[in-house]
Amino acid sequence: MMAIKVMIVDDSAVMREVMQQLLAPHKDIEVVGAAMDPLLAMQKMKTVWPDVILLDVEMPRMDGITFLRQIMATRPTPVVICSTLTEKGAAITLQALSAGAVEVITKPTMGLRDFLQDSAQEMLTAIRTAAKARVRSAAAPTLSKAESRAAVDVVVSPPPSVGLQNLRTSERIVVLGTSTGGTQALEHVLSQLPRSAPAIAIVQHMPEKFTRSFAERLDSLCAIEVREAQNGDRLLPGLALIAPGGKHMLVKRSGGQYLVEVKDGPLVSRHRPSVDVLFRSAATQAGRNVLAVIMTGMGDDGARGLKELHETGAKTYAQDEESCVVFGMPKEAIKLGGVDQVIALDDIPSVLMSWR
């Protein structure tokens, strides 16, 4: 098996040195170069092109976002962003995700060496996942399946055989779940929707402080309103609510209306927010009044929740392998038998608009 060729591009000498030390013991990963800025990186990449690029955002001579866009325009390559977690950094990182980055690893402004040592597994997972990603022009503790089910039961009870989900209402809602590659995919979908689009609730796996900036960016690009969800927000046509990083988001029914509940809770399917939590709550509270799509992402979060939605009569879709950056979550949902139809990313906007 060929080793994953990695290029490190970061203006921090400590970052470059420690990263190479961390990766050296792993036989499936080979650091083929390190550079303090994108211009030096491009010179080195003329000799050997990497499978994955570890990229800082703010660097001398050329910033990381400009470099990322050049790479995606000329020779699309999986990129993992390494950025400091600040409000400014969050906005910059979101631009990078929109430009085609596959994953984000946040790093502190101080204590970098200790941080990298503590986060070695997260970095390794990000690199290995990125190497399998399909890029185009433009981690959390592991839980067993039994533990994941127990965790989701704590946050939201399983849907009963007869209940609110079996009652037709005049309101229809859409629930979307995604992870790796989802920032681009959501931008592609939401930016095509008119103001008459149905109400949408979204879980995108993303750290705290990132989701607000992500929602604001989407809101600036879309005809519909997009915002980070707050507890008690009503799901309304022409509005997309994104679950805040670090919180679960649930669908709640109030009479003939649907609201969202934002709450704390344990990790579910290794995530908070969790797609399984959103989907199960939608199955419990809305059932056949829901259209659900599980989109690009690593792992299996959302697969069981989509199956529960399917069993209550909701319309369920999965993004196809060809248009996914990582065909993990949709693949697991298909395996469980909870998917009515597999569709391409380009078809999702019209499917959502057909939901009346």
Image (cartoon, grey):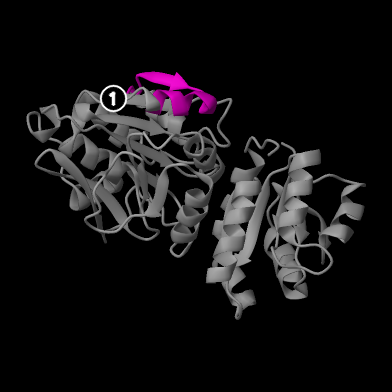
Locate residue 345, reporting x and y percent. 52, 28
Bounds of the magenta span?
337-352
Q: Amino acid at mark 1?
A: Arg
Q: For the point 58% across and 74% down, which residue is it?
A: 108
- Residue 63, picture quadrant: bottom right
What residue appears at the point 21 percent right and 23 percent down from the top-left corner?
A: 313
Is any part of residue 60 visible from this angle?
Answer: yes
Q: Is residue 228 above or below residue 75?
A: below
Q: Secondary structure at mark 1?
A: loop
Quadrant the C terminus occupies: top left
Residue positioned 28% across, 39% down in the render: 279
| Residue 160 sits above or below residue 230 on the image | above
- Determine which quarter of the picture holds residue 264: bottom left
Check the image and report above or below for 336 versus 267. Answer: above
Residue 80 sits above or below residue 327 on the image: below
Quadrant in which the N terminus is drawn: top right
Residue 338 covered by magenta stretch: yes
Position of residue 245 in the picture relative to residue 164 (left or right): right
The residue that disc 1 covers is: 356
Q: Residue furthest top?
A: 341
Q: Nearer the viewer, residue 230 or 224?
A: 224
Residue in view at x 91 percent, y 47 percent? 46
Taking the magenta stretch, the answer to whether it contains residue 88 is no
In the orientation shown, which residue stands out farthest toward the bottom? 110
Q: Position of residue 229 (x, y in %)?
A: 33, 55
Query: Residue 240, position in %: x, y?
Result: 37, 45
**Splitting the image into 4 quarters, where does residue 89 fall?**
bottom right
Measured from the top left, where is residue 318 in percent x and y? 42, 27
Horizontal side of 155 relative to 331 (left or right) equals left
